[in-house]
Image (tube, rainbow, N blue to C red):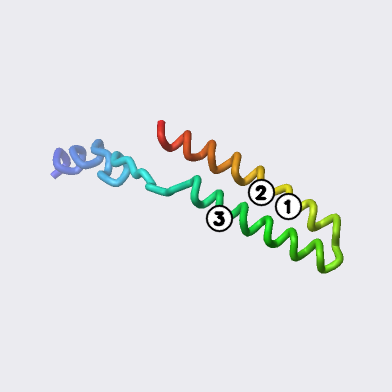
Amino acid sequence: MIIFLRFFMYQKPEFLTTEVKLNMDWKRIGFGASLVSIVASIGIYFNGDHELGIFVGLWASALLLLTDRLAEMTAE
């Protein structure tokens, strides 16, 4: 019985050894998020808060760059 328990104590569980890869289209997600950012910034700008509208509009380029880099990292 003790030998049986020691055998299972030294084995890694199967869920810890398998590698999980997510198949996400990061460029498409980034493009959609940047479009939402642009539309939201236009809406905020014309509702009266000009500075916040400009700030939200700046997110579009950052989202595109971030998701482009994530796509490169997942391809490696």
Pointer 2 or 3: first along the chain: 3
Can you identify the residue that label 2 sits on? 60
* Up/down of 9 relative to 45, above or below: above
Check whether the beta carbons of the residues at disc 2 and disc 3 lie within 8 A of each other. no
Along the horizontal axis of the image, is 10 left or right of 66?
left
Task: Please name the residue shown 54% across and 43% down the image.
Answer: 67
x and y, in percent, of residue 18 in the image: 29, 41
x and y, in percent, of residue 24 in the image: 42, 49
Q: Which type of secondary structure does the marked residue at label 1 adopt?
A: helix
x and y, in percent, of residue 50 in the image: 85, 58
Can you identify the residue that label 3 sits on? 32
Along the horizontal axis of the image, is 60 left or right of 31?
right
Can you identify the residue that label 1 sits on? 57
Label 3: few (<14), some (14–19) or many (≥20) C-alpha neighbours in 10 Å: some
Q: Residue 17 sits in which quadrant?
A: top left
| Cα gap from disc 2 to disc 1, whole angstroms | 6 Å
| Cα gap from disc 2 to disc 3, whole angstroms | 10 Å
Label 2: few (<14), some (14–19) or many (≥20) C-alpha neighbours in 10 Å: many
Task: Please name the residue shown 59% across and 54% down the image.
Answer: 33
Tell me the amino acid under the disc marked 1: Gly
Tell me the amino acid under the disc marked 3: Gly
Tell me the amino acid under the disc marked 2: Ala
